[in-house]
Image (cartoon, rainbow, N blue to C red):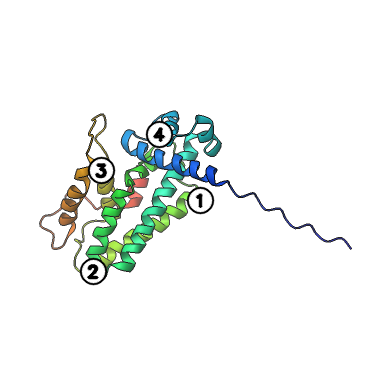
């Protein structure tokens, strides 16, 4: 009696291939923040220390690289939100910790999701995005219930502000701007605390609002 052959497992990527992929994603994350989503791919390869062929072996086109960078940043920021919730008893302290950690993760690299032509509906992207939104909304709601967060701000307000404060102005060589990021984030966070000292113009920005742009 013949026995069924065991299914063949896909070979695991070699360690050097994984390191190259990680370097490419890290370089793309930095350069998307610094220069925008249209930065030449050969420049990303150069910063990552790999050849163009290596980059295209991992990411056949710009869209695939965009997607992986956004997923990577979303997942890392989600981990930071989970850690803040688990380790900080004070609700606003947890929110503050998350904001500074998100800045260090270069959350501005998420901006490609606003670029025309970017596939916002890829299942891996949706899964990472939904989990991040859930965690940040919970962080904010926890601070709001504690009476520490003003009631007229939403998740979109928070994420837009972090992106803007961690991103150099277009066309301006702001070398060393990173040393001001956490200082200015702290000023922003002070403005989020309740009781509010002013009435904000317009309506709170949700992440759904941003996706409709």
Tell me residue 125's x, y (percent): 46, 49
Tell me if I can see residue 205 in this picture. Answer: no
Tell me residue 52's x, y (percent): 50, 30
Q: Mark 1 points at which residue?
A: 123
Q: Looking at the image, which residue sits at the far front?
A: 16
Local crowd at mark 3 within 10 Å, few (<14), some, or many (≥20)?
Answer: some
The numbered dot on residue 102 is none
Tag 1 secondary structure:
helix
Distance Cα–Cα, label 4 vs label 1: 29 Å
Q: Nearer the viewer, mark 4 or mark 1?
A: 4
The disc, 1 or 3, on the residue closer to the chain's N-terminal end is: 1
Tell me residue 191's x, y (percent): 15, 55
Q: Mark 2 points at which residue?
A: 90
Distance Cα–Cα, label 2 vs label 3: 26 Å
Tell me residue 66's x, y (percent): 44, 40
The mark tally for this picture is: 4
Q: Name the residue under label 4.
A: 47
Local crowd at mark 4 within 10 Å, few (<14), some, or many (≥20)?
Answer: some
For the N terminus, the image quarter is bottom right
Q: Name the residue under label 3.
A: 164
Local crowd at mark 2 within 10 Å, few (<14), some, or many (≥20)?
Answer: some
The disc, 1 or 2, on the residue closer to the chain's N-terminal end is: 2
Local crowd at mark 1 within 10 Å, few (<14), some, or many (≥20)?
Answer: few
Q: In this view, does 185 lie above or below 52?
A: below
Say if mark 4 contacts mark 2, CB within 8 Å.
no
Nearer to me, 123 or 51? 51
Tag 4 secondary structure:
helix
């Amino acid at each position: 009696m013949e026995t069924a052959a065991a299914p063949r497992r896909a070979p695991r990527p070699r360690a050097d291939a994984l390191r190259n992929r990680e370097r490419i994603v890290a370089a793309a994350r930095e350069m998307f923040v610094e220069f925008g989503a249209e930065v030449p791919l050969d420049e990303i390869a150069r910063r990552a220390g790999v050849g163009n062929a290596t980059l295209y072996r991992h990411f056949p086109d710009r869209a695939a690289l965009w997607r992986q960078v956004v997923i990577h940043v979303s997942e890392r920021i989600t981990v930071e939100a989970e850690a803040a919730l688990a380790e900080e008893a004070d609700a606003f302290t947890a929110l503050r910790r998350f904001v500074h950690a998100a800045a260090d993760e270069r959350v501005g690299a998420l901006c490609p999701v606003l670029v025309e032509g970017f596939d916002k509906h890829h299942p891996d992207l949706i899964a990472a995005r939904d989990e991040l939104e859930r965690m940040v909304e919970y962080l904010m709601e926890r601070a709001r219930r504690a009476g520490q967060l003003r009631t007229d701000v939403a998740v979109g307000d928070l994420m837009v502000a972090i992106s803007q404060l961690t991103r150099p102005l277009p066309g301006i060589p702001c070398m060393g701007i990173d040393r001001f990021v956490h200082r200015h984030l702290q000023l922003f966070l002070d403005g989020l605390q309740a009781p509010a000292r002013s009435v904000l113009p317009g309506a709170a920005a949700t992440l759904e609002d941003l996706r409709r742009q």
